[in-house]
C-alpha cells in the first residue's frame, strides 16, 4: 500500500474523551475511531490487524475439526424465554419492531446454535460435533470505559461442542484448552489458565487471562506450580501459602481474553435437543462452549506492546510486516532517484509475498515520517535516503539499532522472521 493514495487517520493529539490506554494508542495511530462509549469503527489499518487475529483463531479452530458458520445477530424473544434469559440476563439489548414483536441483539448464541444443531444431530453417530463462528456481539454494559476491553459492540469467536457423554465433553474440552494455548502463543501472549466459577454448569470453568497493569480482573497466582484462580472464588492474600505446593501466592491484575465452559445440558434440555444411543434410547445432548474476544485481543495486545513513541505490533498480527520510507531532499533530481530505488524495493518485496506499507509521500519531512512510523508500530522499518546510498537503513520497531544493510540482508531477515 502506498501512503500517498491511502486514507489518513493518524492524529497528533491524545483523544480527550478516552481514558483507556489501548484506545488512546489505537485512535492516535489511525487504527480505530470512537463512535460512542463502547462502540468503535475499525479503520483500514485496524481491520487488517483484526483479520490477522481472526485468521490465527480460525486456523486453530479448523485444526480441531470444528466447522465455521455464521449465525444471526437479531434473535426473537421466544428463544430467550425458553432458557429464562430474556428477564435474567441484564446486559441484553432489546428492540421492538414495527409490528410490536420483541427481539434481542445477540450477546451470545446458545439460544440460536441449539435449534440449528437440532437439524443435524439425531443419533450418537452424529456426535461429537463442533460448530463455531466469528460474529459481532452486543452487550448493554453499564461501564464501557476500557476501550476495546469492554465494549457494547464487539467481535467474538464462539465455539459450541455437542457430545454423547461427559467423558467425551472432557476430552474435547482439553483439546480446546490446548488449541487456545497455541492461539495465544501465536499472538505473542503469555496467557494464564485460570479457574473461575462454573456457575450452574459445573464447579469450575476456565478463563485465559493475560497480566496487564490496567486489567479489570484480580487473579490469585502461584508461579511455582501455575495454580491460578479468579479472585471471585479465592480470597487469598498476597504472600499466603499456595494450597497446591506451599509457595507464596501473588495477586495480579489481568485481562480476560478467552473462556471455556462445560454447559452440559443447560441449553439442550429447554430445546429438547436429543440423540439416540446404540439401543435407540433418547438422551439430552451434552454441550460445551468456548469463547475468545477477537476485538478485545486487539486491545490487550495494544496495552502490552507499546512504548512512549507508539505501538509495537507482534509480527503475527501487524497490519504490514515492513514500513518502507523514502526521504526527500532539497534537490528534485536526487529525490526522484531516491524514490525510484524505493519503488523498486517496494515492488521486489511485494513480489516476494511480504506485505509493505510504502511511505512514498514526497512533501512530508523525514522527522514527521519517523514519528508516524513509530506511532503505527509496524515491526520492521526500512529507509532509503541520500545517506543510505546503495544500502538500506534497517531498524526493528521493538528496540533494535539502526543498521545500513544490503538488500539481501532484508530478504533473509524476512524469510526467517515473517
Image (cartoon, rainbow, N blue to C red):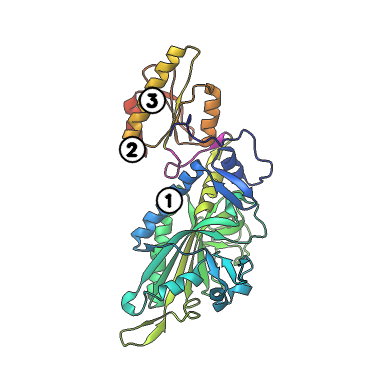
Residue at position x 62%, y 63% from top?
Answer: 236
Q: Secondary structure at mark 2?
A: loop
Task: Decide if residue 88 is on the left or right side of residue 132.
Answer: right
Nearer-the-camera pick, 67 or 8:
8
Magenta segment: does it hold 217?
A: no
Vertical position of residue 367 compared to residue 81: above or below: above
Q: Nearer the viewer, mark 2 or mark 1?
A: 2
Marks 2 and 3, how far apart in space?
Answer: 16 Å
| Magenta part, dominant SS | loop
The residue furthest front is 99
Residue span colored magenta: 309-320
Location of residue 381 by image quarter? top left
Residue at 55% in and 29% down: 371
Instruction: Quote the CA–CA distance across marks 2 and 1.
Output: 24 Å
Q: CA distance from mark 1 to mark 3?
A: 35 Å
Q: Position of residue 189 (x, y in %)?
A: 47, 49
Tag shown at residue 90? none
User: Do we see residue 256 in this rendering?
Assistant: no
Please name the residue shown 46% across and 31% down the image: 400
Mark linked to residue 353 = 2
Name the quadrant of the N terminus: top left
Q: Are marks 1 and 3 in contact (CB under 8 Å)?
A: no
Residue that mark 3 sits on:
343
Task: Kindly identify the residue that appears in the image at 38 percent across and 64 percent down.
Answer: 175
Quarter of the figure that contains the C terminus: top left
Pointer 1: what residue? 185
Name the N-terminal-most of marks 2 and 1: 1
Helix, strand or loop under label 1:
helix
Amino acid at each position: 500500500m502506498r501512503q500517498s493514495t491511502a486514507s489518513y487517520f493518524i492524529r497528533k493529539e491524545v483523544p480527550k474523551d478516552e481514558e483507556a490506554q489501548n484506545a488512546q494508542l489505537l485512535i492516535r495511530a489511525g487504527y480505530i475511531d470512537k463512535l460512542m462509549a463502547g462502540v468503535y469503527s475499525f479503520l483500514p489499518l485496524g481491520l487488517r490487524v483484526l483479520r490477522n487475529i481472526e485468521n490465527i483463531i480460525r486456523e486453530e479452530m479448523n485444526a480441531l475439526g470444528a466447522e465455521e458458520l455464521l449465525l444471526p445477530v437479531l434473535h426473537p424473544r421466544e428463544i430467550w424465554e425458553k432458557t429464562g434469559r430474556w428477564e435474567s440476563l441484564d446486559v441484553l439489548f432489546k428492540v421492538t419492531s414495527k409490528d410490536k414483536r420483541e427481539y434481542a441483539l445477540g450477546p451470545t448464541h446458545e439460544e440460536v446454535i441449539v435449534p440449528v444443531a437440532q437439524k443435524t444431530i439425531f443419533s450418537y453417530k452424529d456426535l461429537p460435533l463442533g460448530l463455531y463462528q466469528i460474529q459481532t456481539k452486543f452487550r448493554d454494559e453499564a461501564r464501557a470505559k476500557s476501550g476495546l476491553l469492554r465494549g457494547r459492540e464487539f467481535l467474538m469467536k464462539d465455539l459450541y461442542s455437542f457430545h454423547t457423554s461427559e467423558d467425551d465433553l472432557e476430552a474435547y474440552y482439553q483439546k480446546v484448552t490446548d488449541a487456545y494455548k497455541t492461539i495465544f502463543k501465536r499472538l505473542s501472549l503469555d496467557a494464564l489458565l485460570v479457574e473461575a466459577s462454573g456457575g450452574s454448569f459445573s464447579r469450575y470453568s476456565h478463563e485465559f487471562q493475560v497480566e496487564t497493569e490496567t486489567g479489570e480482573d484480580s487473579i490469585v497466582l502461584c508461579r511455582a506450580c501455575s495454580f491460578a484462580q479468579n479472585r471471585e472464588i479465592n480470597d487469598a492474600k498476597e504472600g499466603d501459602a499456595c494450597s497446591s505446593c506451599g509457595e507464596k501466592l501473588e495477586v495480579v491484575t489481568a485481562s480476560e481474553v478467552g473462556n471455556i465452559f462445560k454447559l452440559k445440558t443447560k441449553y439442550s434440555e429447554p430445546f429438547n435437543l436429543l440423540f439416540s444411543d446404540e439401543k435407540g434410547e433418547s438422551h439430552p445432548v451434552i454441550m460445551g462452549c468456548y469463547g475468545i474476544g477477537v476485538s478485545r485481543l486487539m486491545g490487550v495486545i495494544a496495552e502490552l506492546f507499546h512504548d512512549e513513541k507508539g505501538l509495537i505490533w507482534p509480527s503475527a498480527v501487524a497490519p504490514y510486516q515492513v514500513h518502507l520510507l523514502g526521504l526527500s531532499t532539497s534537490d528534485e533530481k536526487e529525490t526522484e532517484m531516491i524514490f525510484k530505488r524505493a519503488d523498486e524495493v517496494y515492488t521486489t518485496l511485494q513480489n516476494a509475498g511480504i506485505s509493505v506499507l510504502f511511505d512514498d509521500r514526497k512533501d512530508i519531512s523525514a522527522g514527521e515520517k519517523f514519528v508516524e512510523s513509530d506511532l503505527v508500530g509496524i515491526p520492521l522499518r526500512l529507509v532509503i535516503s541520500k545517506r543510505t546510498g546503495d544500502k538500506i537503513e534497517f531498524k526493528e520497531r521493538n528496540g533494535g539499532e539502526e543498521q545500513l544493510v544490503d538488500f539481501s540482508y532484508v530478504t533473509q531477515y524476512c524469510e526467517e522472521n515473517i
